[in-house]
Amino acid sequence: MLPGFGSLEASTYVPSFSRKAAKMADKWVELMQGQDTFTIDVPAWTARATLWWVLLAPHSAFGIDLSSVDALGEAAFDYQFNALDDMSGELTKVFNNLFAKTRLNPGNWEIFVSQMVALMPDNLVRFWNENVPDKKRAFLIRSREASERVARQLVEEKSAALLAENGGHDIMSLLGQRDRGREGQLVPNEMLASFRRSSLPGTRRPANTISWILLELCRNTDVQTRLRDEIRTVRRQRDEPELTAATFDDMPYMTAIVKEILRFHPAIYNMHKEATRDDIVPLSHPVVGTDGKPIHEIPVQKGQKIILSTAAYNRDTNVFGADAHSFNPDRWLKEGYVTKQSLGVFANLLTFGGGNRACLGWRFAVLELSAFLVELVDKFEFSIDPKLKIQRGAVGFMIPLVEGEIEKGSQLPLQVRLAPSTD
Ligand code: HEM
């Protein structure tokens, strides 16, 4: 495991995550203005609340040690609070529905053009971007420029002071070290490129996953009630001013729900890989070919592109039980129900990938999801208008869409009311 990404470092973030979730909850209460129920479009709020990962990456990239949580957290949260208070911030505007605006339901021509552009050399792509009118590409470029501008501005403000204390444990340095060997150093432009490539998409994953959790809690009201009971019992027993990672250890049902949602609605539904050498991939269960014969292994050639379906693996009945297609957090509480596999970094799931390119932020993501879940379900009851049909939209990651309003992009309007006190 890479230093800087361990449980200890991740757990120091929990109070910050919890404050962020509580702040979002306070905003909702303000908006309710004494009404009994209020409709909240969940993705619009969670995207703003978790936007700080966008800033975490450039901070880290330029030398803030991940263990300096106070400096890092406060700097990042200054910006994050702006996002929650005000939707007009530059980054907030460009990231709002970025992927839905640019990737949802592309037509045949768009798919063809994007594949052609991907094959072009860099200078031709630059020419294309600068000269060919294309609204979606222009929006993507504007988003990229905005994130770079903010990143560079933060670098100027902070890096001089913090670079001197850099122990090389920040996200981008670690990625760079792994990719280039211990002596290798990334220069700022490469760090920005690396940030765009790997960390930027990571900003939306926790936000989307929170939407799916709340949706499943609306569909499964018994799960929601049982979860609230657990949260309130544990909080009463522990009587702590703020959440810590240890609080979550006392909440097995909440932990089971987080695992189940990461299984049932993996934010990244598939992964693209390329074979680095000729190899044979053995299959744990044979599949039947078109000729009716069983296939036990698949030969791959160096350079061959492979798409791994996380969504399919996560619902494999051989691993997760006969009811793998249902949302059932209890599967995680029954010994032996989920077959143990040496796959993935968390709970046998493929959700965070696996091997040496697995998600570096998975511990942060799990703790962030837990903190949001605890704060929100403690305070509110969630329900959904039964007439609304929510469907999944694939834009590189999975977003919730309202049937009949797909053109509006990511949406999940839920009815929210204050959960009655049990004291
Ligand atoms: C629910 C939340 C998240 C999910 C589902 C998720 C999932 C993934 C997946 C599937 C990959 C690719 C793995 C592979 O190719 O094998 C990945 C890579 C990555 N993720 Fe996450 N991620 C999440 C949150 C985060 C967060 C919060 C961070 C913040 C630091 C993060 C940082 C990264 C980085 C840096 C990589 C690139 C790793 C590399 O190239 O070596 N992720 N993530």
Image: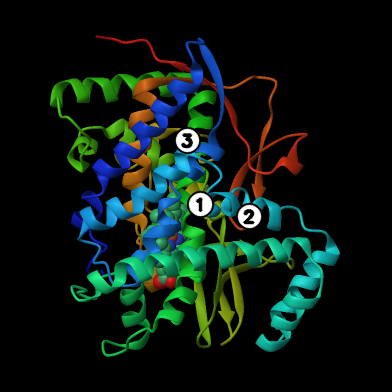
Q: Residue at x 60, y 45 (%)?
A: 399
For ligand 1, give the image quadrant.
bottom left
Depicted 84 relative to depicted 30: above or below: below
Q: Name the residue carrying label 1.
A: 204
Distance of label 1 from label 2 (alpha carbons): 9 Å
Which disc number belongs to residue 389?
A: none
Residue at which label 3 appears: 213
- Does residue 320 sit above or below 306 in this rendering? above
Q: Earlier in the sequence, mark 1 or mark 3?
A: 1
Label 2 CA crowd tier, 10 Å (few <14, some 14–19, many 20+): many
Which quarter of the image is occupied by the C terminus?
Answer: top left
On screen, residue 219 versus residue 20, left or right, reads right
In space, the residues marked 3 and 2 are separated at their CA atoms by 20 Å
Question: Which of 103 and 20 lies nearest the eye of the viewer?
Answer: 20
**Helix, strand, or loop for circle 2?**
helix
| Disc 1 + disc 2, Cβ < 8 Å | yes
Residue under label 2, please give it: 99
Q: Quadrant of residue 257?
A: top left
Q: Percent x, y for residue 188?
A: 40, 80
Residue 229 in the image: x percent, y percent?
30, 19
| Observer-nearest of 162 and 398 | 162
Q: Amino acid at mark 3?
A: Ile
